């Protein structure tokens, strides 16, 4: 049975008010105190004229002030000659996507601190200690003060500062994530992002995204158009993985003159491995739980003309019951787990129990007995893989979460960077896919079968 209705899915914006702090970077620097010498008048006697003494004191004080000013100017000149900070001091509309760069032209950098009321700023120092650059973009419409201490040629140190403000963009974009805070998903679940505006600088957006996973994971980002971006592991997620996502999107230029305005964070879990394989020709479905066959049930799938399409799908949502309406029927159907947007489900079909295991009589759904449908319903969460095989009908891209229709090389081609992402407890890094060891995962329990959406 197929439900001809629009799907409603919930998307999470991250934990309300929750922002993931970033490392403070290089150690804080103390302000350099400029010391000036004190000068006083000599011992006076009755033979020294008061006016002369006053003039002498004023002259000494002026000389000391001039000396201090000259010393300060010399130090400032030395600092300017030795250290360059970009954006420069006084900039009022700095490009946040360019970040902060600090370069030591003579000696080496000792300390760099960045003070702001916005997101914490982290950076990386080059191996030679000559260059420091921020790791992520800066916030839009935000004030920053950068203080740098560097060694100078001939010994000693100088300290210099740049205070500036980033621009207030006229065009902005926002980003949403499907996953909900601390929710549990299946081992096939992609990280799903949507953007409020079309993105043209896709590479910059990809570089701003970070995953931290409790277990090592290899995957990639894939652009489905200009406003949807998904992360999928190369093979199914390890069961029991905790995933933390951070989109350092504040200040990222997604298109010419258009910037992100917030940092997006979310944490969710991957639950047990629940994999269903439905064979429309054999009229059976196998249900594997954590890698072991738990159930082997009779089914009735789509009748001729309404064949259930082949493909490796994911469960999208479940309801008990669903009102299914089509030509000649309107039924309240219990224990329904959806896997296509067009309305294909694993569900209770008490009316077809006699055909289950022998004949395909449904309008495209996978019919189960009431007891079996209830059992599967209670186990299922969004993102559990369902692979349909044996059908004369091929699957349709984007009719459901169809990321697993694609092979790993095909999926990589959807990345603007054409790079894989290695994630683990320490965060994530982009790597050349050719540098990765070959996958040892086997289908259908650890990864999707090859060419799975093709008709039989």
Image (cartoon, rainbow, N blue to C red):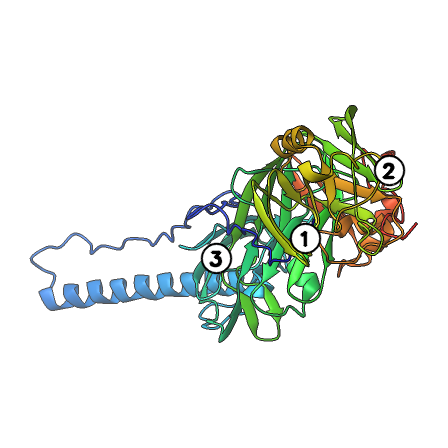
Work out how far the residue at label 2 is from the one at label 1, CA to CA, in angstroms: 34 Å
Work out how far the residue at label 1 is from the one at label 3, CA to CA, in angstroms: 56 Å
Query: Which of 48/102 is in front?
Result: 102
Q: Is residue 145 above or below residue 87?
A: above
The dot on residue 343 is 1
Mark 3 closeness class: few <14, some 14–19, many ≥20 residues within 10 Å: many
Residue 295 picture location, percent across and down:
76, 25
The dot on residue 196 is none
Q: Is residue 187 above or below residue 256?
A: above
Residue 83 picture location, percent across and down:
57, 60
Query: Which of 71/111 is in front?
Result: 111
Residue drawn 65% across and 61% down?
Answer: 228
- The quarter holding residue 103 reads bottom right
Q: Is residue 357 above or below residue 452?
A: above
Residue carrying label 3: 146
User: In what element is the residue under mark 1?
Assistant: loop
Residue carrying label 2: 439
């Amino acid at each position: 049975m197929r439900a001809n209705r629009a799907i409603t899915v919930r998307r999470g914006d991250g934990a309300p008010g929750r922002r993931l702090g970033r490392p403070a970077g290089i150690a804080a620097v103390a302000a350099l105190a400029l010391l000036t010498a004190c000068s006083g008048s000599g011992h006076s006697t009755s033979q020294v004229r008061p006016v002369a003494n006053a003039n002498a004191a004023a002259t000494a004080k002026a000389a000391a002030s001039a000396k201090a000013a000259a010393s300060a100017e010399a130090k400032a000149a030395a600092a300017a000659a030795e250290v360059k900070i970009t954006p420069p001091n006084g900039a009022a509309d700095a490009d946040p996507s360019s970040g902060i760069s600090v370069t030591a032209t003579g000696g080496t950098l000792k300390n760099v601190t960045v003070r702001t009321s916005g997101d914490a700023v982290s950076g990386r120092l080059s191996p030679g200690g000559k260059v420091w650059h921020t790791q992520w973009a800066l916030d839009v419409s935000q004030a920053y003060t950068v203080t740098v201490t560097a060694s100078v040629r001939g010994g000693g140190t100088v300290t210099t500062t740049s205070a500036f403000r980033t621009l207030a963009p006229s065009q902005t974009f926002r980003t949403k994530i499907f996953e909900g805070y601390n929710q549990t998903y299946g081992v096939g679940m992609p990280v799903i992002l949507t953007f409020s505006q079309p993105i043209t600088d896709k590479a910059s957006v990809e570089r701003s995204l970070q995953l931290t996973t409790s277990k090592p994971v290899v995957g990639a980002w894939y652009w489905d158009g200009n406003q949807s971006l998904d992360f999928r592991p190369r093979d199914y997620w390890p069961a029991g993985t905790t995933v933390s996502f951070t989109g350092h999107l504040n200040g990222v230029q997604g298109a010419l003159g258009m910037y992100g305005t917030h940092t997006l964070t979310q944490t969710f879990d991957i639950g047990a491995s629940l994999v269903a394989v439905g064979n429309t020709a054999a009229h059976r479905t196998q249900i594997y739980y954590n890698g072991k066959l738990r159930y082997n049930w009779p089914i009735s799938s789509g009748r001729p003309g309404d064949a259930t399409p082949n493909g490796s799908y994911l469960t999208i949502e479940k309801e008990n019951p669903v009102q299914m309406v089509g030509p000649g029927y309107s039924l309240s159907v219990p224990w329904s787990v959806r896997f296509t947007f067009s309305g294909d489900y694993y569900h209770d079909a008490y009316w077809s129990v006699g055909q289950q295991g022998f004949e395909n009589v449904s309008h495209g759904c996978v019919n189960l007995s009431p007891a079996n449908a209830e059992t599967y319903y209670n186990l299922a969460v969004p993102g559990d893989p369902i692979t349909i095989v044996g059908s004369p009908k091929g699957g349709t891209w984007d009719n459901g979460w169809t990321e697993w229709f694609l092979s790993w090389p095909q999926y990589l081609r959807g990345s603007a960077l054409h790079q894989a992402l290695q994630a683990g407890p320490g965060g994530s890094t982009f790597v050349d896919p050719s540098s990765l060891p070959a996958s040892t995962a086997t289908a259908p329990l650890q990864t999707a079968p090859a060419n799975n959406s093709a008709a039989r």
